[in-house]
Image (cartoon, rainbow, N blue to C red):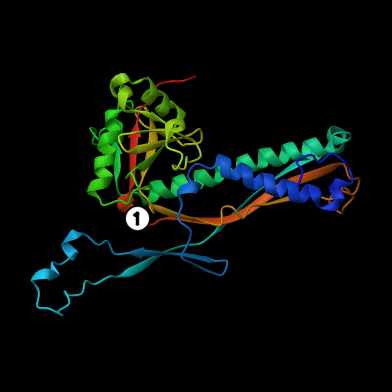
Amino acid sequence: MTDYITKRSDLTSGILQEYLNRKTIENLDLTCRFAQFGEKPTVQQGYNTLRWAKFTRLTASNVSDISTSTEGTNPDGVDFDASSVTATPTQYGIVVKLTDLTISNTVIPFLKGAADRISVAMAEKIDTVIQASLLAGATNVKYGPTFGKTYPTDVVSTDVLTGPALAKWYAFLQSKGAIPFDADGSYVAIMDTACAYDLMIDSSSAGSWVDANKYSNATRIFNGEIGKLYGIRVVVSNNITTVESTVTLHPIYVLGKGAYGVANWQNLEILISPDQPSTANPLNLYRTAGAKVAFGTAVLQADALLVVEVAASSIS
């Protein structure tokens, strides 16, 4: 379908609605930083309950040497349990009004523009909700880039991100048995632009940094990813909520695969009001554009989630 929706007849033909729905999902995919790493639910029980399976971790100690056993004798069975994590979807929505005087001769560009801005706002909301869930469910919260502070109030303005800290984050998730995201064993860190700036101007690890555009062709680049250092793939977001303490704390979310689940976030629906009078709008003085989505999120593997709160340089 063409991206050029220009005729007023397109407003009632369904072409515009189809176009806006498609572009909205594209914008969500491009804008969301946290949602892209969420596991889909194992089972969705109707509208009200989302359920993810949570499996027992197996280690080398569970593997037996059967070469020394009597032939035909099986090793002792290991109890393998599966629990579940559930969440209830929450519905979110936004509506904007476009007055008839504003859009009288430019209705289609205005509706396109409104849909673009609405989808970005919804993407930011989705990521904000996921962040709040991660902070509430995290059991590994550290203060200072290399965990050198005991309390959030201990963090000072010089506790900004440097390259070697990522090596410690990698070692920490490895020690917890967190599953990497790809075959080369990499984890992911989502940070804001101020932290990314501090990382970029730190020269101590310049020789180890790999830009995302230098990855092999087989490597999928995540939305917002700028590069990799010490086994940590760095994803940048301009929508991370800071925490006020002695200094402003910037949370960095370091993830292994399956750390959390997100469901239905791509089921966003955009709605355009018809170009005709209604009970609420008898003079047809405005059109409305809006969107709604019902989604849920939950921490699944606490040992695959590390939150590091640091100070950051001012970039304003």
Left or right of 230 on screen, residue 114: right
- At x 56% / y 53%, what residue is drawn? 265
Say if 236 sits above or below 36 in the image. Answer: above
Left or right of 188 on screen, residue 34: right
Say if 209 sits above or below 276 in the image. Answer: above
Say if 95 sits above or below 198 in the image. Answer: below
Q: Is residue 52 visible?
A: yes
- At x 24% / y 33%, what residue is drawn? 149
Q: Quadrant of residue 232?
A: top left
Q: Quadrant of residue 62?
A: bottom left
Q: Residues within 10 Å of mark 1 (few under 14, many from 20)?
A: many
Q: Amino acid at mark 1?
A: Gln
- Please name whichever residue, 176 or 278, is drawn nearer the observer in this view of the structure: 176
Q: Secondary structure at mark 1?
A: loop
Left or right of 146 on screen, residue 240: right
| Count of residue discs | 1
| Residue bearing mark 1 | 301
Query: Picture coordinates of residue 180 (x, y %)?
Result: 34, 48
- At x 32% / y 38%, what residue is drawn? 231
- At x 17% / y 77%, what residue is drawn? 74
Q: Is residue 122 visible?
A: no
- Please name whichever residue, 219 or 125, is drawn nearer the observer in this view of the structure: 219
- Please name whichever residue, 186 or 12, is drawn nearer the observer in this view of the structure: 186
Query: Picture coordinates of residue 276 (x, y %)?
Result: 89, 49
Query: Picture coordinates of residue 190 (x, y %)?
Result: 42, 38
Toward the bottom, the furthest residue is 72
Query: Picture coordinates of residue 102 (x, y %)?
Result: 84, 33
